[in-house]
Image (cartoon, rainbow, N blue to C red):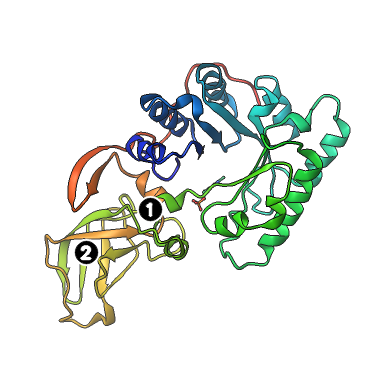
Amino acid sequence: VKTVKQRVVLEILLDAGIRAFKCATVRELTAILEAGRSLGCEADLDVLLAYPLRGPALGVFIEAQDDSPARLRTLADDPAHLTTLLGWLPPAAVLLDIDVGMGRTGSAMAEWSAFAADRAEQVPFAELGGLHAYEGHVRDATDPALPAIYESLARFATAHLRHREQLVVTSGTPACLVAAADPHLAAGPFQHQVSPGTLVLSDLRSAPIARALGVRPAAFVASTVVHRGRGRCTLDAGSKALGADGPGPHAEPFPPLPIEIATPSEEHLPVRATGATEDAPLPAAGTLVLLVPSHVCTTVNLHDRAVWYAGGRIVGDGPIDARGHDLWRPSTSPSQ
Ligand SMILES: Cc1ncc(COP(=O)(O)O)c(C=O)c1O
C-alpha cells in the first residue's frame, strides 16, 4: 500500500484476488480497509501495519482492530513494546519485529530469545501472529548474506512458532524472489510471505527484478520543458515532483531520449544532451516529457492527484488518498 497509496489501484489489486496487504501508516491502513469495504471483501482482508506503532497511531490501530472485520496485525519492536501491545491486542495480532542487520527497527533474535526464556509463562510466543524480518539493507539479490539471514530466521521461527496461521514476513522488492525460493523458510510449520511494494508500480531501482518478472513501469511524472539552452534544457520536475532520496539520476525519460538527467533543484530538473554537443537534438520548450522515477514510492507521496492512463488514453484522475500523515488524533493513546 505504501507504494501506490491510491484507492483506485488498491481496488485493481483486490479485483485481481489479492487479499494480503502490508502498509506503513494509518492512512494507508484506512485506504485499504475502505477499498475492501467498497468492493465487499473487507472481511477477507489480511493487513499488516508493519511499523512500531506508539501513541495516537497505536490508538487508531486499536480502534480499527475493534471496528473492522478484516484481520489486522502489527509489529512489536522490542520486549517492552510487546508487553504494551499485548495489553490492547490479542497475541495473534502481533508479530515480533526482528532486526536482521538493517539497524532500523525491531530487536535481535538473541534479545527476543532471552525474553521468551524469561517470560515464557506470561508471553505466549506460540500464540503470536508470527515474525517480521525486513532485510532492506541488502539490496543485491546475489549477496550471500541473504541465505544466511533466512537460515537463521527459519531456525528461530521453527523454535517459536507452531502453526500455518503464524506468518514469517520478509523482503521488499530486491530480495523477494530469493526469499520466496528459500528452502528453509518454505519448510517451517509457519507460513512464509514476502512483501514487495515498489514492484507494484516499478521504477528505476526495481527495474532488474521488474524485467525478470516481465512487468513494466506503471507510474510516470509528466514534466514540461520550461527552458531550452544550448546542449541542455530544464524540465519542471524538481525534487518537489520527483523523489530525490538515494543516489541519482533520479529519473529517466520514457520513451528514452539522448539526454542525461542532472541533479534536481526544488522546481527544476536540468538535463544535458548526451555528450553535451551544442546542437544535439533536445525537446523544444513546451514539450511534455514523461519520466520514470528512480524511487516511485517517495515520488507518489509528493503528489495530490494522479492521472490514470489505460488502453492508450486518459481514463480519469483522482487523489493519492493515503499520501502524507495525519495530525495527532484525540483517541486512545497507549503510553508506549
Ligand atoms: C518494512 C518494509 N517492508 C516492505 C517494504 C517494501 O520494500 P520495497 O519498496 O523494496 O518493495 C519496505 C520498504 O520500505 C519496508 O520498509
**Residue 17 at what x, y percent from top left?**
44, 39
Relative vertical location of residue 276 with respect to residue 66 in this rendering, above or below? below
Residue 243 numbered mark, or none:
1
Give the percent coordinates (x, y) of residue 114. 85, 40
Q: Which residue is mark 2?
A: 234
Residue 8, placed above or below residue 65: below
Identify which residue, 163 or 193, lies in the foreground.
Answer: 163
Q: Quadrant of the C terminus?
A: top right
Q: Quadrant of the N terminus?
A: top left
Q: Sort mark 1 into few (<14), some (14-19) or many (20+) by Cα contacts within 10 Å.
A: many
The answer to which quarter of the image holds residue 276 is bottom left
Q: Nearer the viewer, residue 85 or 333?
A: 85
Q: Gap between marks 1 and 2, in whole Å?
A: 17 Å
Disc number placed over residue 148 in the picture, else none: none
| Numbered disc 1: secondary structure | loop
Secondary structure found at label 2: strand
**In front of the other: 2 or 188:** 188
Q: Is the C-beta separation of discs 1 and 2 under 8 Å? A: no
Residue 13: where, in percent of width, then height? 40, 41
> Is 5 positioned to the left or the right of 111 in the image?
left
Q: In the rendered structure, which disc, 1 or 2, sits on the residue that comes first in sequence?
A: 2
Q: Is mark 1 within 8 Å of ligand 1?
A: no
